[in-house]
């Protein structure tokens, strides 16, 4: 009797593959209204790689935001088109000068921020027109965004996170367990035939192609899912 492969087990939505959101401090989004506030605390959240800051706004609301480098408790933070270009302030892209470093960028106006949210990263505004704003992402790719999309000014704190080695497999395991990530990761070739379509044969040779059609069943849909092209780009 066979057993379900990882793709099938993940689809059940059991606790092994469910994010423990009840442990996290909360969602990080830009405030819906334009206002100013004060940083009341710097907090650590297991669901985010970067430090967070708790901002109390004038209307009595409290929001979580990514802490930029150089921010301290007691600093003021402003959100709105009239805000000055200062670390932690939130402005529309059309109001941010070219060459400014930004983070937590909205893909669509009002979504709260979707891009550049990892510790130590930043993007840069490189060109602006009346219809769109060109932003250079950390991946060195350029993306055109609507001028009304908002972003925070500065660089996200925690840039030295990737420089510290884990040293022990147990340390890495505990870090992955905080977010309930499956660890360790094993390649499909090293599994048994009942665990993965690439498994078996007692060798590291795939018995079937890595390309999988879009209409393949869940047990077979592994590898490259309906790729437009494969191989090295020459």
Image (cartoon, rainbow, N blue to C red):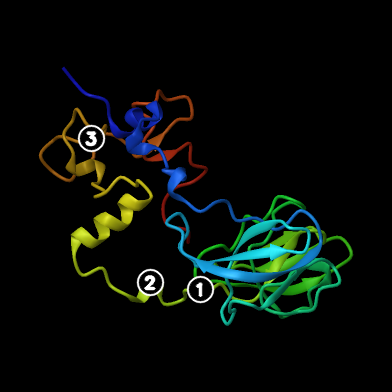
The x, y position of residue 55, in whole percent, is 65, 65
Q: Could you classify mark 1 by the number of other residues whose Cα lies within 10 Å: few (under 14), some (14-19), or many (20 or more)?
A: some
Q: Could you classify mark 2 by the number of other residues whose Cα lies within 10 Å: few (under 14), some (14-19), or many (20 or more)?
A: few
Q: Could you classify mark 3 by the number of other residues whose Cα lies within 10 Å: few (under 14), some (14-19), or many (20 or more)?
A: few
The quarter holding residue 93 reads: bottom right
Residue placed under numbered mark 2 in the picture:
162
Q: Earlier in the sequence, mark 3 or mark 2?
A: 2
The residue nearer to you, when weighing 205 against 75, is 75
Instruction: Tell me: 58 left or right of 232.
Output: right
**Residue 120, numbered circle:** 1
Q: Earlier in the sequence, mark 2 or mark 1?
A: 1
* Residue at image location 70% in from the left, 50% down from the top: 111
The x, y position of residue 190, in whole percent, is 18, 43
Instruction: Tell me: 108 left or right of 211.
Output: right
Instruction: Tell me: 196 left or right of 216.
Output: left
Under tag 1, what secondary structure?
Answer: loop
Labels 2 and 1 touching (C-beta < 8 A): yes
Q: Which of marks 3 and 1 is in front?
A: 1
Between the residue at mark 3 and the residue at mark 2, the CA separation in whole angstroms equals 36 Å
Q: Is residue 91 visible?
A: no
Residue placed under numbered mark 3 in the picture:
207
Q: In this view, which residue lies farthest toward the front?
A: 60
Q: Which of marks 3 and 2 is in front?
A: 2
């Amino acid at each position: 009797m066979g057993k379900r492969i990882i793709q099938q087990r993940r689809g059940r939505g059991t606790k092994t593959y469910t994010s423990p959101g009840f442990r996290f401090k909360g969602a990080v989004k830009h405030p819906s209204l334009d206002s100013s506030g004060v940083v009341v605390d710097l907090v650590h959240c297991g669901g985010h790689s970067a430090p967070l800051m708790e901002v109390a706004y004038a209307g009595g609301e409290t929001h979580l935001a990514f802490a930029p480098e150089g921010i301290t408790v007691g600093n003021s933070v402003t959100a709105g088109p009239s805000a000055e270009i200062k670390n932690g302030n939130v402005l529309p892209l059309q109001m941010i000068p070219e060459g400014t470093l930004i983070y937590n960028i909205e893909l669509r106006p009002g979504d709260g921020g979707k891009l550049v949210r990892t510790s130590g990263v930043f993007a840069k505004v490189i060109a602006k027109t009346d219809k769109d704003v060109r932003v250079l992402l950390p991946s060195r790719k350029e993306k055109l965004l609507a001028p009304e999309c908002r972003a925070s000014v500065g660089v996200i704190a925690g840039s030295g996170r990737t420089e510290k080695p884990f040293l022990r497999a147990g340390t890495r395991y505990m870090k992955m367990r905080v977010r309930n990530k499956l660890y360790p990761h094993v390649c499909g070739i090293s599994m048994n035939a009942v665990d993965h379509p690439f498994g078996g044969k007692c060798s590291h040779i795939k018995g079937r192609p890595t390309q999988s059609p879009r209409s393949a069943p869940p047990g077979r849909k592994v590898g490259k899912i309906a790729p437009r092209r494969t191989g090295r780009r020459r």
